[in-house]
């Protein structure tokens, strides 16, 4: 049986509302994921460094501040600078439909909003972590 998927859940920027992120962390742990949570108010570089140290196979970003169109590309850039461009990124939060489309076009694997089904989140994160694992193995 393969190792548990390794997922980092992160709260970039000044957003201090982390109840949803904590719920996702618990959901993932209960589903057998190995998960680490950054805590609130992390910079993109801090998130990339924690992803590197944790050997994350996927990163989930929780953003409720409305700054998703600035923060997500900044995290993507930080992951690339850290040599982690192969690590899939999933976003969640208050994200309008037009921004969801733009984020997906930028390379975000999935975007979730409040009310998303737990099964959908688990499936997306499991698939993202598996893709990240395969990409890392290809080197």
Image: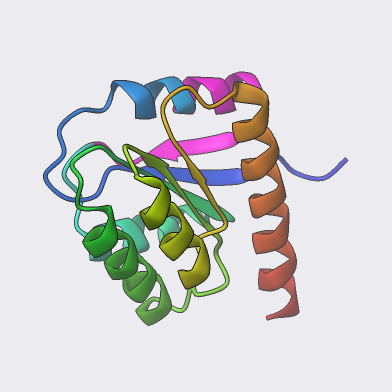
Q: Is residue 125 left or right of residue 85?
A: right
User: Which quadrant, please, contains the C terminus?
Assistant: bottom right
Q: Is residue 5 visible?
A: no
**Residue 65 location, quadrant:** top left
Q: Residue at x 47, y 52 (%)?
A: 54
Q: Is residue 88 left or right of residue 95?
A: right
User: Is-magenta flag for residue 99?
Assistant: no
What is the x, y in percent for residue 100? 44, 53
Q: Nearer the viewer, residue 123 or 45?
A: 123
**Residue 94 location, quadrant:** top left
Q: Is residue 124 visible?
A: yes
User: Is-magenta flag for residue 35?
Assistant: yes
What is the x, y in percent for residue 37? 37, 37
**Residue 47 location, quadrant:** bottom left
Q: Which residues are magenta?
A: 25-39
Q: Is residue 108 left or right of residue 32?
A: left
What is the count of numbered marks?
A: 0
Q: Nearer the viewer, residue 34 or 132?
A: 132
Q: Is residue 47 left or right of residue 28?
A: left
Q: Nearer the viewer, residue 68 or 86?
A: 68
What is the x, y in percent for residue 106? 46, 71
User: Which quadrant, please, contains the N terminus?
Assistant: top right
Q: In the rendered view, tell whether residue 104 sits above or below residue 4.
A: below
Q: Residue at x 24, y 49 (%)?
A: 12
Q: In the rendered view, tell whether residue 116 sits above or below residue 74.
A: above
Most extreme residue toward the left is 14
What is the x, y in percent for residue 122? 64, 32
Most extreme residue toward the front is 98
């Amino acid at each position: 049986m393969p190792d548990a998927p390794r997922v980092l859940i992160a709260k970039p920027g000044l957003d201090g509302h982390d109840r949803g992120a904590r719920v996702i962390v618990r959901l993932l742990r209960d589903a057998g994921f190995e998960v680490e949570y950054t805590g609130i108010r992390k910079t993109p570089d801090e998130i990339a460094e924690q992803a590197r140290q944790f050997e994350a196979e996927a990163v989930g970003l929780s953003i409720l501040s409305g700054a998703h169109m600035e923060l997500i590309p900044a995290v993507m850039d930080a992951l690339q600078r850290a040599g982690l461009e192969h690590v899939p990124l999933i976003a969640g939060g208050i994200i309008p439909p037009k921004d969801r489309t733009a984020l997906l076009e930028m390379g975000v694997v999935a975007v979730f909003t409040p009310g998303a089904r737990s099964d959908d989140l688990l499936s997306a994160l499991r698939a993202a972590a598996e893709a990240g694992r395969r990409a890392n193995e290809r080197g």
